[in-house]
Image (cartoon, rainbow, N blue to C red):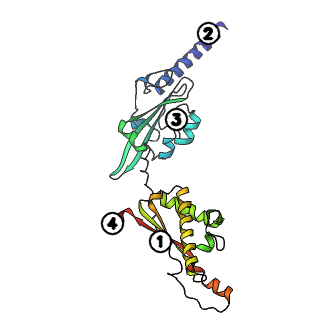
Amino acid sequence: MKKLNLTRRNARLTLCAIALLALQGCTSYVSKGIADDGKTAAELVFQPLTDAWQPEGIFPNKDNLRAVRPGMSKDQLYDLIGRPHFNEGLVAVREWDYSFHFRTGGGAVSCRYKVLFDRDYRAQSFHWEPSACASFIAEPPLAAPVAPVPAPIPKAIQLSADALFAFDRAALQDLLPSGRRELDRIAVVLGGAKVEHVRIVGHTDRLGAVAYNQQLSEARAATVRAYLIGAGVPGERLAASGRGAREPVVQCQQAQRDDLIACLAPNRRVEIVVKALDENTR
């Protein structure tokens, strides 16, 4: 009986020795002296392609390769770049090897890729053979910011006096909300533009006395100038004047007064005429 037990014990020892030798055979090509933190190795070993179970390699997804980061688990790496292409061992494996190909203008380039793991089997360092292969997954350069194209400076802007002011009014407090919004928009354009000067010209319709219309047109132009200055446009660029009813844009002959007033509306206006700095060179 003792002899039988001794035989069994020797058989188990023999099997263990064979298993150990097998494991050693499976790990004969692993890198030497991988640091506990997985960031370095005394000697990196890239196995020959003849030892790969998938010697033809693959064309990897570059975005997935760029997403590989230190600290990833083996499952996370598997999801991104697949299983390794070589058999580094059966137990306690702390490196994975891949054979990748990248397309170029002159064909395809073959590269080797190695991942080293720390003692907790978290990926920590990544290596290429040849090292220049790392350039294939370098982040593409950011496009240079495109300078915004400045909006063209309008040569002339016509504003309806009926939209700017209350009826027969010209003071700053008489500006309507719609007129203030329009002047705010114009102030932004003029404030950021290269402008030599701006002429603000008030016009009226032909109804009423000539002297009164002249005074009304001047007052409205002056109010628009004051508003633009208050909105940030340099005052030295702005000049205001009035033309009364001398420069109509429409002629009307309606017999009914209300119809005539409506027809003459385009004549009741404030014009803003802009001269840009570069116009003198044209």
Label 3 vs label 4: CA separation?
60 Å
The quadrant of the rendering that contains the C terminus is bottom left
Q: Residue at x 45, y 65 (%)?
A: 198
Mark 2 to mark 4: distance in Å? 112 Å
The three-letter code of the residue at mark 1 reads: Ala
| Cα distance between the residues tagged 1 and 2 | 111 Å
Q: Tell me which label, 2 or 4, sits earlier in the chain.
A: 2
Tag 3: amino acid: Arg
| Image coords of residue 24 (percent x, y) | 48, 22
Q: Which numbered tag is attached to residue 117?
A: none
| The N terminus, quarter of image | top right
Which residue was labeled with disc 1? 156
The residue pinned by badge 3 equals 69
Residue at left offset 54%, top offset 68%: 221
Mark 2 touching mark 3, by CB under 8 A?
no
Which residue is under mark 4? 280
